[in-house]
Image (cartoon, rainbow, N blue to C red):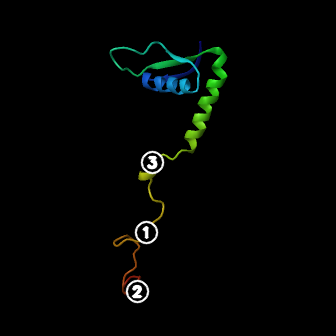
Amino acid sequence: MVVLTTVVGSFHGRVLCARLGAEGVAAELSPPTDGPYPLPREVDVLVRADQLELARQILLADAVDAAFDSPWPRATRPRLTRRWQPGWPGRRSRSGGGGPAG
């Protein structure tokens, strides 16, 4: 087994192992992460030497896909257009003058 990458935290490491496992790449964590306290520490993700290049390609493809993903889910995405609403600064007065009185 060779080191593919190092991550911080056993949760991140397990998610990465599951992602690689879904593509058929056997992966494991070192040092073992099962303990009484979930301390954030560096964990090595290990893969077989003959699957190292495939695992690197999977991680690269995931990173490229993540770069193009929207940071917000579709339902909570902010609107990019401004609509006129009463009380907004820059609102024109109804008298049509628009400028300072004087």
The residue tagged with tag 3: helix, strand or loop? loop
Mark 2 — residue? Answer: 96
Residue situated in front as seen by the camera: 48 or 88: 48
Spatial CA distance of label 2 from label 1 is 20 Å
The residue tagged with tag 2: helix, strand or loop? loop
Name the amino acid type tagged 2: Gly
Quadrant position of residue 10: top left
**Residue appearing at x 60%, y 38% in the figure:** 64
In the image, taking residue 39 as reference, residue 42 lies left or right, namely right
Spatial CA distance of label 1 from label 3 is 22 Å
**Residue appearing at x 42%, y 16% in the figure:** 33
Mark 1 — residue? Answer: 83
Residue 90 in the image: state x and y as whole percent.
Answer: 41, 73
Mark 3 — residue? Answer: 73
If the image is split into quadrants, where does the N terminus sit? top right
Q: Is residue 7 above or below residue 69?
A: above
Residue situated in front as seen by the camera: 5 or 89: 5
Spatial CA distance of label 2 from label 3 is 42 Å
Name the amino acid type tagged 1: Arg
Name the amino acid type tagged 3: Pro
Name the mark nearer the viewer: 2 or 3.
3
Residue 62 in the image: state x and y as whole percent.
Answer: 58, 34
Quadrant position of residue 26: top right
Residue 29 in the image: state x and y as whole percent.
Answer: 49, 16
Which circle's residue, 2 or 1, is located before the other in the chain? 1
Q: Is residue 71 above or below residue 3?
A: below
